[in-house]
Amino acid sequence: MKIGLIRPYEIEYNNQDIIDLDKAIKSLGHVPKRVYIDKIGVSMDRGRIDVTHMVSKNRPQSLGIDCAFLRHLGIIKDYEQFGSRLWSVRAIEQSGTLVMNNLMSWLMASDKLASLSTLAKEGLPVPHTFVTEDMFSAYREMKDEKEVVIKPIRGSMGFGVFRASDPDVAMHIFSYFTNLSKPMYLQRYMEKKGGGDYRVIVIGGRAIGAEFRKGKDWKSNVAQGAIPRKARMDDEMEEIAIKATEVLGLEYAGIDIADTREGYMILETNPTISWQGFKKATKINVAMRLVEHMVKRARE
């Protein structure tokens, strides 16, 4: 079986997660293939869609994969580029290739507004969150909430995330977002028990483990220096993580959960997880579990 790893050529580097997947695919007797989303060609005729891949200066070659992990769409410069890359992945799916996570679920789960509103509607616990493009509405929300975390809607690893308790200081952040034509995403700041939060990894409807991440300050992202350690899941945490993954239609995910005075709260959902901190803390080979699940699904 040939298993694709979808990511952009423009940011090709020796990412350890990709290296782990390469090793796992080979160890199980399959063939990994780098699929660069910015080198894809989509050809369509009546009743037919073909996807090609420009791997050299020669003629494009047939994609030739049985299934693929959607890992990254790259550094997006405008909406048309984003749309082109999204629907190129969709064309890969339409051509008969199993893509994991599937595009529409990946798109919803990687957008904080889409994912949290979906989880909230299904009755899952999420902190009070407010999203707007109007900086004055954000200012009024800030005054009501007293202390908030301000995030980009599409982002990861804690980059570009602010904590604010002064509405007038926050107004400068809102002005910055407005000048970049970005919406403002405000989430009520909640004190987390133990000063950190949990990430539960779910694969194929099963929570395979959890890590507790605690940083030097209020951020709990491993990319920001937080230290991960193995954590024990109780039944409630496990149920929340599995349900969140199911509601979003994901085959696998990292669900970030905080233990607060109001109980467990889902902070974010991650459909393209990086598992290096988790692997170090739990000794679980996430890549192997993912490839095993992919092969099982592809053979169904």
Image: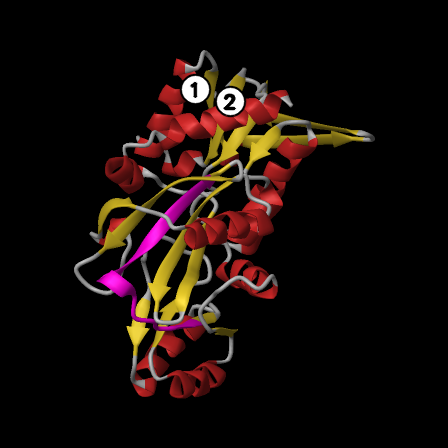
- Residue 247 image point, x, y percent: 59, 52
Q: Residue furthest right?
A: 46
Does the magenta segment cover residue 191?
yes
Q: Nearer the viewer, residue 167 or 205?
A: 205
**Which of labels 2 and 1 is toward the front?**
1
The answer to whether 69 is drawn above or below residue 277 in the figure is: above
Q: Residue furthest top?
A: 29
Residue 82 visible somewhere in the drawing: no
Look at mark 1 in the image and give the residue it sits on: 25
Q: Residues within 10 Å of mark 1 (few under 14, many from 20)?
A: many
Does the magenta segment cover residue 80?
no
Q: Earlier in the sequence, mark 2 or mark 1?
A: 2
Quadrant position of residue 162 = bottom left
Quadrant position of residue 216 = bottom left
Q: Residue furthest front?
A: 235
- Residue 138 image point, x, y percent: 45, 81
Q: CA distance from mark 2 to mark 1?
A: 7 Å
- Residue 227 image point, x, y percent: 20, 49
**Residue stretch in magenta:** 186-202
Say which residue appears at 39% left-offset and 57% top-offset: 257
Q: Nearer the viewer, residue 220 or 212?
A: 212
Three-letter residue code for mark 1: Ile
Say which residue appears at 40% left-offset and 66% top-offset: 263
Circle on res. 38: none
Q: Nearer the viewer, residue 122 or 142?
A: 122
Three-letter residue code for mark 2: Ile
- Residue 19 image point, x, y percent: 34, 26
Quarter of the picture containing the N terminus is top right
Marks 2 & 1, CB-CB < 8 Å contact: yes
Say which residue appears at 43% left-offset and 28% top-offset: 289
Say which residue appears at 39% left-offset and 77% top-offset: 174
Look at mark 2 in the image and give the residue it sits on: 3
